[in-house]
């Protein structure tokens, strides 16, 4: 090689070395390449895992065997376990070990309720009311595992990354004994613990049944949680969700009164969400209890110390289009928890019937969940209707007979008012010819002048046209109380009488074939409703013979409306409680008899007519202040019209 060749080779080497030097990767690029290599290795491992699982699945489908080398199988399992451990450690922190477990069930019960608890979430997954059945004679479960969720929500220690939120229903609790510890006959309790990184750190649920009661004690203990939860964490939330199972024959009737009730700790009144649409309420104050109320049963969570004030706490309800469930209800509440080494919160569940006496015994206004009407109407039910009904119920007789006796008692008690009303109507009937003559006389006069002449006749005859209104007003609270009482009475549920199999539901004597349904009426014929409509027709005829509707267009419209009312009630009540239709049928029949008795033995129209004529000979009574003001207004109006 000559000198020029050597120099050329050296220059080529220098250029090559310089090119590599100036183009070598930076430290950041090297780190990035290493991360890509790691991610690729992880992806390859996951691909191997998926491939192995697919091979297992295919082999199981073909011959339930698989030929994979022990080395590959162990490698895949190690990768799988490592990935799951990392994922659970990242998600649950020191609770990661509780992410794995075996689902099992523990049952505690007494004579009234049977509660089933799952190790997954340590929560109630079913409550059966042993004294009751569904409308089709199946065990009555308020909810099941598919329709309910109960979880505590909190944040793990700041030492762990990620979202940090933990839901206890995703983790496995450990029962503290394989058998129920009995505290007495038919009573029991069970302890469920969610462990952290050691046996000295856990969340404990204690469920207990004490006595022959619908109340299930529920205590939550936090032990050694001070370094497992977020620093200064006071946010232990309860998330309670339930799709309420349909229990009755008519799901539309259930939906009409199914909703969420709640009571604030510092108030006596009870509030509730809409019964007809979706609704939500933010709970900005301490709440005493929250109840998921159905037509005849309720699930209530009670905290006597009150759930803590929180603007994020809320209750919600949503309608469901389902034949199995009525509505979706949820409650988000805040426990009065203080982060520390140990803390305990005592609560209770009520799982039972919406029975007035049963609910009122707890003295926390649970009975307010039963819809007995507006305050005045409710007072009538509480102090009159319910005591009489319960007194009759103590005789252990048929509920059909109880309704008959209750109706008789009410109608007899109202007889003096009824008599006064009919007597006033009889006076108006006697005066009817004179009023018609007066109307003809003042036919061309203005309405105010005609009204004044009519009122003058009433004063002279000693008749008060408003006398019949007061007795009717006095009867209205009782009549409306009965309208509310029967559909809300669980005592009538599945009680038969005559042809009615269930007095709390409609009584069908004929179901239309082929799913045929008449709009607004239904797919069946209710005999008690037919009898009620027929009795109402004869009641209106009997009432018209005792009273006077007057004459003219308004009287004609009133007569048409009165005759049309029985048909309206026939349509409206066809899907209502048979007990309610039966009550109205009895009330109409008794009223017809009372009218007949009053006309035959208590009121003589000739005597009334003679008395009115005697009253007309006496000086007219002084005008009332109201009549004087009415006449003064009439004069002012006439004066303005002349101008």
Image: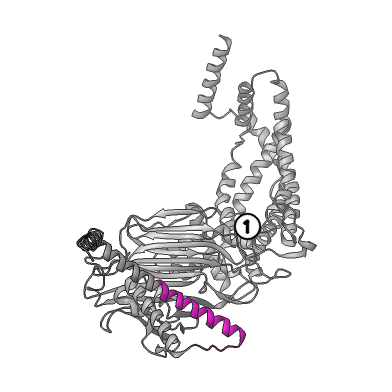
Q: In this view, does 451 lie above or below 474?
A: above
Q: Does any portion of residue 348 appear in the rendered image?
A: no
Q: Which residue is drawn at 58% across and 51% down?
A: 475
154 or 470, nearer to the observer = 154
Residue 96: x %, y % from top left:
33, 77
Query: Which sits in the foreground, 443 or 293?
Result: 293
Query: Which quadrant is the C terminus positioned in?
Result: top right
Q: Where is residue 9 in the image (x, y as percent from the top left)?
A: 24, 63
Q: Which region is colored magenta?
A: 43-67
Residue at the farthest front position: 2
Label 1: state its secondary structure: helix
Pinpoint residue 31: horizontal percent, then vertical percent: 27, 65
Residue closest to the eye, 553 or 6: 6
Is residue 182 rendered magenta in the image?
no
The answer to whether residue 310 is left or right of residue 497 is left
Indicate the quadrant containing the N terminus: top left, top right, bottom left or bottom right. bottom left
The residue sitting at 43% across, 82% down in the picture is: 76
Q: Which residue lies furthest to the right in this view?
A: 513
Q: Where, by quadrant of the figure, is residue 404 drawn? A: bottom right
- For this rendering, which residue is in front, 421 or 298? 298
Give the percent coordinates (x, y) of residue 522. 72, 57
Q: Mark 1 = which residue?
A: 411
Residue 331 can be seen, yes or no: yes
- 312 horizontally vs 141: left or right: left
Q: Is residue 551 above or below residue 111?
A: above
The answer to which quarter of the image holds residue 609 is: top right
Q: Main secondary structure of the magenta part?
A: helix
Position of 379 with respect to 435 (left or right) is left
Q: Which residue is drawn at 55% across and 20% down?
A: 634
The colour style of the image is: one colour
* Label 1 environment density (alpha carbons within 10 Å; few <14, some 14–19, many ≥20): some
Q: Is residue 504 left or right of residue 430?
A: left
């Amino acid at each position: 090689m000559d000198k020029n060749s050597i120099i050329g080779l050296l220059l080529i080497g220098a250029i090559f070395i310089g090119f590599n030097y100036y183009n070598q990767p930076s430290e950041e690029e090297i780190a990035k390449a290493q991360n890509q290599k790691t991610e690729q290795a992880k992806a390859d491992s996951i691909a191997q895992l998926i491939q192995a699982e697919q091979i297992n699945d295919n082999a199981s489908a073909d011959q339930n065997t698989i030929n994979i080398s022990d080395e590959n199988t162990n490698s895949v399992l190690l990768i799988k376990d490592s990935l799951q451990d990392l994922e659970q450690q990242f998600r649950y922190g020191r609770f990661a070990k509780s992410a794995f477990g075996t689902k099992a069930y523990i049952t505690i019960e007494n004579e009234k309720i049977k509660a089933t608890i799952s190790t997954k979430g340590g929560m109630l997954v079913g409550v059966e009311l042993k004294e009751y059945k569904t409308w089709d004679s199946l065990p009555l479960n308020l909810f099941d595992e598919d329709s309910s969720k109960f979880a505590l929500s909190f944040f793990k220690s700041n030492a762990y990354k990620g979202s940090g939120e933990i839901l206890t229903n995703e983790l496995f609790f450990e029962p503290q004994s394989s058998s129920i510890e009995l505290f007495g006959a038919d009573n029991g309790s069970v302890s469920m613990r969610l462990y952290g990184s050691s046996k000295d750190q856990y969340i404990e649920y204690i469920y207990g049944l004490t006595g022959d009661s619908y109340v299930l004690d529920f205590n939550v203990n936090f032990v050694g949680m001070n370094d497992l939860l977020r620093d200064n964490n006071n946010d232990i939330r309860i998330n309670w969700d339930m799709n309420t199972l349909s229990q009755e024959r008519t799901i539309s009737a259930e939906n009409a009164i199914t909703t969420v009730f709640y009571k604030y700790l510092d108030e006596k009144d009870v509030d509730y969400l809409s019964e007809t649409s979706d609704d939500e309420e933010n709970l900005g104050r301490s709440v005493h209890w929250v109840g998921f109320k159905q037509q005849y049963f309720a699930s209530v969570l009670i905290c006597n110390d009150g759930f803590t004030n929180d603007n994020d706490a809320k209750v919600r309800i949503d309608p469901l289009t389902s034949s199995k469930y009525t509505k979706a209800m949820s409650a988000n509440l805040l426990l009065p928890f203080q982060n520390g080494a140990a803390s305990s919160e005592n609560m209770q569940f009520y799982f039972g019937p919406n029975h007035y006496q049963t609910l009122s015994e707890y003295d926390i206004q649970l009975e307010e969940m039963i819809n007995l009407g507006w305050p005045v109407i409710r007072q009538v039910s509480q102090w009159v209707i319910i005591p009489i009904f319960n007194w009759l119920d103590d005789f252990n007789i048929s509920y059909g007979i109880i309704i008959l006796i209750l109706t008789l008692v009410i109608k007899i008690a109202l007889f003096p008012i009824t008599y006064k009303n009919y007597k006033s109507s009889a006076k108006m009937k006697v005066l009817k010819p004179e009023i018609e003559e007066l109307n003809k006389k003042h036919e061309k006069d203005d309405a105010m002048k005609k009204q004044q002449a009519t009122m003058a006749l009433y004063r002279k005859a000693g008749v008060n046209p408003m006398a019949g209104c007061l007795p009717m007003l006095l009867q209205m609270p009782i009549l409306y109380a009965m309208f509310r009482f029967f559909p809300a009475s669980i005592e009538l549920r599945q009680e038969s009488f005559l042809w009615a199999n269930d007095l709390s539901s409609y009584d069908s004597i004929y179901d239309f074939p082929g799913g045929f349904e008449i709009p607004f009426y239904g797919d069946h014929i209710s005999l008690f409703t037919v009898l009620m409509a027929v009795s109402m027709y004869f009641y209106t005829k009997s009432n018209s013979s005792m009273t006077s509707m007057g004459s003219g267009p308004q009287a004609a419209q009133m007569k048409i409306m009165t005759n049309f009312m029985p048909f309206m009630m026939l349509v409206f009540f066809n899907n209502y409680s048979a007990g309610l239709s039966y009550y109205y049928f009895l009330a109409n029949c008794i009223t017809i008899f009372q009218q007949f008795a009053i006309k035959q033995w208590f009121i003589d129209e000739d005597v009334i007519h003679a008395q009115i004529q005697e009253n007309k000979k006496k000086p007219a009574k002084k005008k009332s202040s109201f009549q004087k003001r009415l006449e003064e207004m009439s004069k002012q109006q006439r004066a303005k019209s002349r101008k």
